[in-house]
Image (cartoon, rainbow, N blue to C red):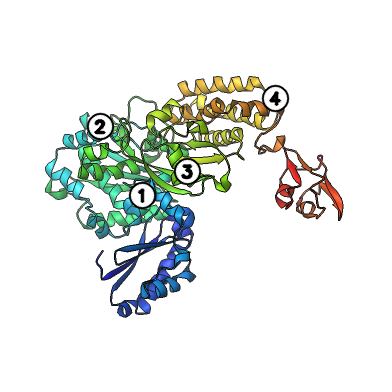
Amino acid sequence: MANDTIEIKVCLGTSGNAAGGEEVLRMFRHYIFEKGIEARIGKRCSPSKVGCRGFCSKDVLVDVIANDSRTTYQSVTPIMVERIVEEHVLGGAPIAEWTVKDEYASFNAKQRKVVLGPCGEIDPDNIDDYLAMRGYRAAKKAMTTMTPDGVVDEVIRSGLRGRGGSGFRTGEKWKACRSVPSDTKYVVCNIGEVNRPLAEGNPQAIIEGLLIGGYAVGASKGYLYIRERYHLSVERLRNALVQARERGFIGRDLFGSGFDFDIEFSFGTEAFICGEETALMESIEGRRAMPRVRPPFPAYRGLWGKPTVINNAETFSNIPLIIGMGSAWFAAIGTEHSKGTKIFTLSGKVRNNGLVEIPMGMPFRDIVYGIGGGIEGDKALKAIQVGGPSGGIIPTSMLDLGLDYENLARVGSIVGSGGMVVFDEDDCIVSVAKFYIEFLQRESCGKCVPCRIGTKRMLELLTKITGGTGTEEDLKTLERLSGVMASTSLCGLGRTAPNPFLTSFNHFKDEYLAHIREKKCPAGVCTALITFSVIADKCKACGLCRRACPANAITGAPKVVHAIDAAKCVKCGACYRACKFKAIKKQ
């Protein structure tokens, strides 16, 4: 950035928008342009939007960059803008009480933002910003100095694995598709929930990756598969496509290579099963999203019977970097068998929630206590659920395990969709497993019996256990069901659906047995197993609990110790939350 320019970057991903970022940007433009700020400071002052910065819990984030110094403000509201402009932009004095705190530095310190890096720096609606960061140079390099086989070989040497599920080696998939003689081939980019920040913050990278993929496998048509309700992602991708066409990056005879390529949208249904690539193809072809029997695999026989490569947006966003920087550069990041970085949504009971990008192999301890800033309220960490709904539950005893494909597979989990949820001592692991099985049962397409019936039966048994009527025989049935589903289900959803139960039971068997043998929920979460009572020597007879109770289950009067009628109590916990003297006992 030139010294005669002051830049103001406003985070306008989905989270930033939800926090009021559009109005914050409008106010900055109002004060800068309408109040004549540029003339008063003698410098060009440029307020612009950028994509997600990752630290979503503190949106709206705003950067003020002046004299090669960057100041980041958190939780910015429109009413704060005038003071930032007056005191910082005009006066040169950052407002210390509004700037990000130490947790922002710890949140970013251990990350390696390879794919996410540009999302917080460039205007996603301005292709010139992308070009200034060497955008489309990788595509030009591939099409003018490399053969399609050379591109495939470079991706193989990089060690890149698919970032959307089982982690199949990307280059090998491309090689298979490349080897099939066909006059028509397709490449498809699946843009799921975790990929939205990429589409919102750096859509041109997705397009360039798709373009290179098409050249490598010999496809002339690409699809952006996305849910239409991802309005901001669709809007920015659509704008990016228009600009890419205008600049000649999509169309005929690209870079004078003779290669033609076009991209269009395909809007998906609201179904988790569409993350499975053959169900996704069914959806694109206009049918109900249900998996196909494999083989044949999509690389050999995919969309409309033609060879098809399907990868997600994070995978494609890595491609321009691999071709541009070289496979050796990419392969130097991560572990021996899990190369590069991976994006995760870090959520749950950690202090720093947000979107993170870590090098493969980083220990869970560094993620939770480094990037995440530790557990809220200094409570004890209980478990980490990794891989989305069909991922596994990792106990605290495995905190020093490196997060990569091989280690997760060994402990019964997957990288999956990139979800990571942290649970503390107040969470019931049995209830957590039931929650995920309930989701998977609801999202099962119903095509194959093992998944359709298996998830339903698993949910019934877990509901019995959390309801206090489960037996140890139910646990044996759950184990048998899990084995059958994992080995006989048609697609990955059914085969991985038992993961939440299996991993939680392996590591938290005592908690399951407490629900069954003692009829108690150790965490005090499962409603049917909770009782509330008043601790007489702590009760101040203030009436707060009695007034909060929606079932009129609490009796008492001023100066008279209160009591809870167990027959009337609906176990909502309102009294427990209302009492300021910790006189309500939950057990």
Q: Which residue is mark 1?
A: 198
Q: Find out whether the residues at labels 2 and 1 contact each other: C-beta distance under 8 Å.
A: no
Q: Secondary structure at mark 3?
A: helix
Labels 2 & 4 near each other (Cβ < 8 A): no
What is the total number of numbered labels drawn onto the structure image?
4
Amino acid type for the residue under numbered disc 2: Cys
Packing grade of label 3 (10 A; few <14, some 14-19, many >=20) is some
Q: Earlier in the sequence, mark 4 or mark 1?
A: 1
User: Badge 3 is on which residue?
Assistant: 369
Left or right: residue 157 versus residue 9 is: left
Check if mark 3's residue and mark 1's residue have beta carbons within 8 Å.
no
> Separation of disc 2 and disc 3 at Cα?
42 Å
User: Mark 4, mark 1: which one is toward the viewer?
Assistant: 4
Q: Secondary structure at mark 1?
A: helix
- Labels 2 and 3: the sequence-earlier one: 2
Q: CA distance from mark 4 to mark 1?
A: 48 Å
Q: CA distance from mark 2 to mark 4?
A: 55 Å
**Which residue is labeled 4 in the image?**
517
User: Could you tell which of marks 2 and 4 lies nearer the N-terminus?
Assistant: 2
The residue wearing badge 2 is: 177
